[in-house]
Image (cartoon, helix red, strand yellow):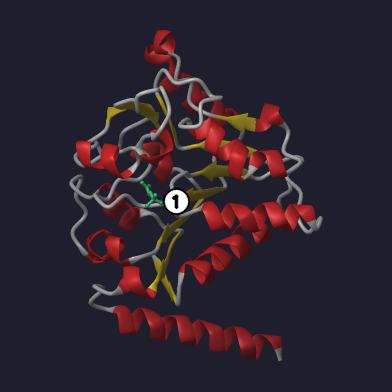
């Protein structure tokens, strides 16, 4: 695990953007795992801006979103499809055929998970998974006590998550769904590389638990301790409760110095 501590949300987003950009430069048809929520919004803006300046292209990129509410139309403002269109996809040259979400049609719930897993495999697996972290430690919509080896399936959201994520539904006629189809933790763990972003003091407790606490289904993000290519990219506020914060910063500085030496 690598822990990158940066000043603020802007720096976290820029650091993550550089990783995405490097990934696309190395592999133009990279498979990206996409996350929603407030945290990656600036990252997506940077990605869209880079496309506008023709610094990166999404023409051959394939995306799999982590989750989608059940029974909601993709055009509704509260759906994650609409979030992705608005904040990233519509501002790039991505081929709509290469955009995947779990099938959230109520009639397909029994087969939807398996189909999604198959599709991910068919496309060669996820090269880079972008994650956020819920205040309760969820990744995707894998709420506390989700099996650490779970696959894509339906999950019921906790009432705390419902409250935190209700903002897109305010003032709309559609009620926020209580259930979502989410990639499983086992599915996420198969990504070749994972970056997890966390900013703000509301994440300080859970970030410390996920990084330095025991691995437990009570804090699903703690399972990332078992992944061999994961970077936590966090700001000072989210890093506040890390016991070994100074050590992580020393490693960061050491790596920077080595890079500088190599460049000379
Ligand atoms: P947030 O959500 O980025 O809005 O804090 C994170 C998550 O729930 O994964």
Is residue 26 at all visible to an observer of this figure?
no
List x then y, in percent, for residue 63.
Answer: 60, 38
- Residue 95: quadrant of the picture: top right
Under circle 1, the secondary element is loop
- Spot the residue most to the right: 54
- Which residue is labeled 1 in the image? 38
Quadrant (top left, top right, bottom left, bottom right) of the C terminus: bottom right
Does 128 appear above or below 179? Answer: below
**Residue in view at x 46 percent, y 80 percent:** 252
- Write down the quadrant of residue 249 in the picture: bottom left
* Image quadrant where residue 239 sits: bottom left
Seen at 20% across and 45% down, the residue is: 217
Image height of 178 relative to 43, above or below:
above
| Residue at x-position 26% and y-position 33% | 157
Whether ligand 1 has any atom under 8 Å from the Cβ at mark 1 is answered as yes
The residue positioned 23% from the left and 77% from the top of the image is 243
Task: Tell me if residue 136 can be seen.
Answer: yes
Q: Quadrant of the N terminus?
A: bottom left
In the rendered view, tell whether residue 174 sits above or below residue 159.
above
Residue 26 relative to residue 65: left or right = right
Mark 1 surroundings: few (<14), some (14-19) or many (≥20) residues within 10 A: few
Tell me: 51 left or right of 161.
Answer: right
The residue nearer to you, when weighing 163 against 219, is 163
Q: Residue 53 in the image: state x and y as whole percent.
A: 80, 58
């Amino acid at each position: 695990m690598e822990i990158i501590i940066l000043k603020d949300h802007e720096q976290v987003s820029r650091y993550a953007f550089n990783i995405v950009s490097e990934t696309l430069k190395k592999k133009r048809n990279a498979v990206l795992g996409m996350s929603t929520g407030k945290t990656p919004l600036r990252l997506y803006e940077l990605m869209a801006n880079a496309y506008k300046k023709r610094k990166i292209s999404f023409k051959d990129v394939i995306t799999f979103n982590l989750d989608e509410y059940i029974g909601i139309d993709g055009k509704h403002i509260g759906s994650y499809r609409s979030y992705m269109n608005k904040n990233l996809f519509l501002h790039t040259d991505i081929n709509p055929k290469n955009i995947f979400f779990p099938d959230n049609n109520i009639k397909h719930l029994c087969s939807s998970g398996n189909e999604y897993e198959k599709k991910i495999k068919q496309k060669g697996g996820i090269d880079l998974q972008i994650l956020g972290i819920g205040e309760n430690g969820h990744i995707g919509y894998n709420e506390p006590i989700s099996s650490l080896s779970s696959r894509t399936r339906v999950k019921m959201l906790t009432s705390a998550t419902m409250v935190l994520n209700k903002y897109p539904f305010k003032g709309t006629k559609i009620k926020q769904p209580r259930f979502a189809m989410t990639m499983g933790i086992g599915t996420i763990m198969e990504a070749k590389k994972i970056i997890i972003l966390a900013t703000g003091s509301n994440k300080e407790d859970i970030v410390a638990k996920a990084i330095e606490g025991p691995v437990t289904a009570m804090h699903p993000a703690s399972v990332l301790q078992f992944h061999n290519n994961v970077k936590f990219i966090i700001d000072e506020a989210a890093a506040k409760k890390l016991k070994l914060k100074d050590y992580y910063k020393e490693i960061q500085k050491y790596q920077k110095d080595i890079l500088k030496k190599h460049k000379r």
